[in-house]
């Protein structure tokens, strides 16, 4: 006869798998249950937003919330390429920051899936889809549902392909075969800029069809890269090794913020049409003016801290920059539908809902992005 097994003699790993977490925090941190928790939180947030704000307000809030999610992989793509190329010839393992940026690239399929509801909300979000008269004969062709679907399908196919390509890495220390060569880097950045310009025009600037700006695409891409890099700085663990390697995260963020602010300033100065005045007028009053002043202060703070960087100073600047860039997404989108920039409770609930559903969907899409 075989003796019954003593539970105390079982392997620790098996005991951990058999016993469920006993606290809410342990449940949320458990990878096996994080997906279900994210889906539950996301669904609850959307349900509460629908109850408090109604379907129309939820639709208006969903677009900028989804754009904040989209900004993570889209913004991480050029930063990951540039950081990898900057470190390409260093005989050292991959930094934690670059690993985090590569992880953010894996959110691209999730962002694409969560963008599907936007297609059903086109008449609510975009004047051209609600029957507004086209601004020009080209607009009458360009802004049609079939043509939009074709462009977005092409854009996201390219973005997912680029994300899958640049999410892979070589061994540690890096082997030459695992590096991103100059040809792939240039091609990837070029395709990314084209896709970003199209997406900015179709998804963001089209909420106010009277205003057109050739800088809008690059401006949004710079802001999204600053958002993604700020999030990566906050999430990535500190690197070990020389101080330069540990403290060189703030400089690229400060440069991105400076480029973003400079393009905003140039666009505001060179555009003098009544449509541009109306567009900026809805965003530079009340809460919008406060955000503009705060954003300028964060840009100056980031530049000043580069003179004496440190881990905690860098994380503080990253946290402030992340908040500014999230609000900047709403600053771009919501005034076209509300008359001025403001953040509502429905906006916050929609953001929580998108984040929760994204967490729930990540495990199903991770297999598309092997780490090696």
Image (cartoon, helix red, strand yellow):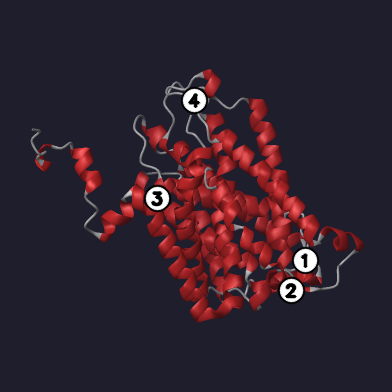
For marks 1 and 2, give the CA distance: 9 Å
Q: Residue furthest right?
A: 137
Q: Nearer the viewer, residue 82 or 292?
A: 82
The numbered dot on residue 315 is 3
**Mark 2 and mark 1 in contact (Cβ < 8 Å)?**
yes
Q: Is residue 91 visible?
A: yes
**Mark 3 and mark 2 in contact (Cβ < 8 Å)?**
no
Which marked residue is nearer to the observer: mark 1 or mark 2?
A: 1
**Mark 2 and mark 4 in contact (Cβ < 8 Å)?**
no
Q: Earlier in the sequence, mark 1 or mark 2?
A: 1
Q: Residue 21 occupies which quadrant of the picture?
A: bottom left
The numbered dot on residue 170 is 4
Left or right of 139? Residue 266 is left
Left or right of 187? Residue 227 is left
Which marked residue is nearer to the observer: mark 4 or mark 2?
A: 4
Left or right of 44? Residue 127 is right
Q: Residue 244 occupies which quadrant of the picture?
A: top left
User: Where residue 319 appears, x then y in whole percent?
Assistant: 43, 55
User: Where residue 200 appears, x then y in whole percent?
Assistant: 69, 56
Mark 1: few/some/many CA within 10 Å (<14, 14-19, 20+): some
Residue at x-position 69% and y-position 44%: 193
Q: Earlier in the sequence, mark 1 or mark 4?
A: 4
Q: Which residue is mark 1?
A: 211
For marks 4 and 3, give the CA distance: 28 Å
Q: Which residue is mark 2?
A: 278
For marks 2 and 3, give the CA distance: 36 Å
Q: Earlier in the sequence, mark 3 or mark 1?
A: 1
Q: Secondary structure at mark 1?
A: loop
């Amino acid at each position: 006869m075989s003796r019954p097994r003593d539970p105390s003699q079982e392997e620790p790993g098996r005991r951990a798998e058999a016993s469920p977490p006993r606290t809410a925090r342990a449940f949320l941190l458990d990878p096996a249950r994080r997906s279900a928790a994210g889906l539950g939180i996301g669904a609850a947030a959307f349900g509460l937003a629908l109850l408090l704000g109604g379907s129309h307000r939820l639709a208006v809030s969903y677009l900028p919330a989804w754009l904040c999610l989209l900004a993570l992989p889209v913004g991480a793509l050029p930063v990951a390429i540039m950081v990898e190329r900057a470190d390409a010839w260093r005989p050292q393992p991959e930094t934690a920051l670059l690993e985090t940026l590569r992880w953010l690239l894996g959110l691209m399929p999730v962002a694409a899936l969560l963008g599907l509801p936007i297609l059903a909300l086109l008449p609510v979000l975009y004047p051209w889809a609600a029957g507004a008269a086209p601004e020009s004969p080209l607009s009458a062709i360009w802004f049609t549902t079939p043509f939009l679907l074709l462009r977005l399908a092409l854009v996201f196919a390219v973005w997912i392909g680029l994300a899958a390509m640049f999410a892979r890495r070589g061994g540690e220390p890096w082997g030459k075969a695992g590096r991103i060569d100059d040809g792939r880097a240039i091609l990837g950045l070029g395709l990314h800029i084209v896709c970003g310009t199209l997406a900015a025009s179709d998804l963001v600037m089209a909420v106010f069809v009277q205003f057109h700006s050739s800088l809008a695409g690059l401006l949004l891409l710079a802001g999204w890269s600053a958002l993604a890099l700020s999030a990566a700085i906050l999430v990535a663990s500190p690197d070990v090794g020389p101080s330069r390697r540990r403290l060189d995260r703030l400089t690229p963020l400060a440069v991105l913020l400076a480029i973003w602010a400079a393009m905003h300033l140039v666009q505001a100065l060179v555009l003098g049409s009544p449509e541009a005045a109306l567009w900026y007028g809805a965003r530079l009053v009340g809460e919008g003016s406060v955000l503009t002043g705060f954003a300028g202060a964060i840009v100056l703070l980031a530049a000043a801290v580069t003179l004496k960087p440190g881990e905690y100073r860098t994380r503080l600047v990253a946290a402030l920059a992340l908040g500014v860039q999230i609000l900047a997404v709403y600053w771009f989108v919501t005034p076209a539908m509300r008359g001025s920039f403001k953040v509502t409770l429905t906006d916050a609930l929609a953001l929580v809902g998108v984040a929760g559903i994204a967490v729930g969907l990540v495990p199903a899409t991770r297999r598309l992005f092997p780490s090696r």
